[in-house]
Image (spheres, rainbow, N blue to C red):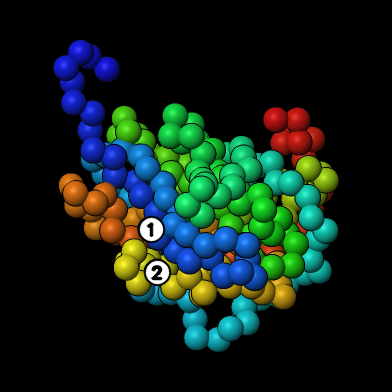
Amino acid sequence: MAPGHRPRLTKDRLIPAVVPLGWAMAAGAVLLISGVHDEEPPRPSAAQALPAAAAPSFPTVRPLPPAEPVRLRIAAIDVDAPMTRVGLDEAGALRTPPPDEPGLAGWYGDGIAPGSAGTAVAAGHVDTPAGEPGVFHDLGSLTEGATIEVDREDRRTAVFTVRAVELYDKEQFPSDKVYGGSRRPELRLITCGGDYTEGTGYLGNVVVYATLTAVTQTREADASR
C-alpha cells in the first residue's frame, strides 16, 4: 500500500446469528470481513428457495463417522479449495479463514464433521480487501441439484447435493433454520451477499443447503494435496 493511501472499506461481513445449543455450546455473531469488489456477487433466484417439505426429494445415504475435512470442491462454480478448522472467538462468533487467505474454506471444527449425522457448517469470504473474488464469491449462483464434494482425512469423499440456496437479510437471519440439528448428514455453506452500503458492508448472507447423497473414495491426487 502506498504511503498516505486510505484503505478501502471492508465489505464482506457475515451477519449475527445465534447458534442453537444442539449445534454448538456457544452463541454469537458469524463475521467475515473482506474488501470492496466492483462486481456484485450473484444472488440466488426465488426458484432456488428451500421447499416447504422438510425431507429432500432425493435419497440420502448412511452417515459417516467423524473425520476432519481437508478439501472442498464445487464444480459448478469452479471451487477447489483447502479447508481449515475455525472456532469461536471470545464473543462467541465464528472465526473465519485469515483475510489474506481468501481461497480457504473454514469449517467449524467443534461442530459436526461433513458427512456425519447432523448439520456441518463451512464459511468463506465472498471478496477480499484488494477487491478480488473470494472462495465463495459465486455461491449465490448455485442451483438445486449441484454437487459439493468434501474430501476427508479418512480418504473418503462426502458428496452432497444442493437442496436450496437462499439469501437472508442480516436482521432476519433464521438461525434455527440454518444451524438446526438433523438426523441426516447435512451441510451449510455461508458467505456474504445482498445489498451493500458504505457504512455496514453487505446487508445479508447467502446460505446453501445440501444433503449427503453419496460417499466415494478420495482420489490419490486429491488426498496428497
Picture layout, residue 140 above or below residue 54: above
Q: Earlier in the sequence, mark 1 or mark 2?
A: 1
Picture residue at 18% right of the left edge, 20% below the top: 5
- Measured as percent of width and height from the top left, residue 40 is found at 27, 49
Q: Is residue 216 left or right of residue 37?
A: right
Mark 1 surroundings within 10 Å by alpha-carbon count, few (fewer than 14), some (14 through 19), many (20 or more): many
Residue 178 appearing in the image? yes
Q: Amino acid at mark 2?
A: Phe
Quarter assignment of residue 46: bottom left
- Name the quarter where the C terminus is drawn: top right
Against 81, residue 93 (above or below) is below
Q: Which residue is mark 2?
A: 173
On the picture, is 67 further left or further right than 78?
Answer: right
**Does the residue at mark 1 contact the one at mark 2 (Cβ under 8 Å)?**
yes
Quadrant of the snapshot with the N terminus: top left
* Rendering coords of residue 127 (x, y %): 36, 41
In the rendering, which numbered label is found on residue 15? 1
Q: Nearer the viewer, residue 210 or 88?
A: 88
- Which residue is depicted at the point 58% across and 83% down? 54
The count of marks equals: 2
Instruction: Find residue 178 and report its horizontal and vertical position in percent.
Output: 51, 69
* Residue at 37%, 43% in the rendered image: 33
C-alpha separation, residue under disc 1 versus residue under disc 2: 8 Å
Quadrant location of residue 209?
bottom right
Residue 34, given in percent of the width and then of the height, sits at 36, 39
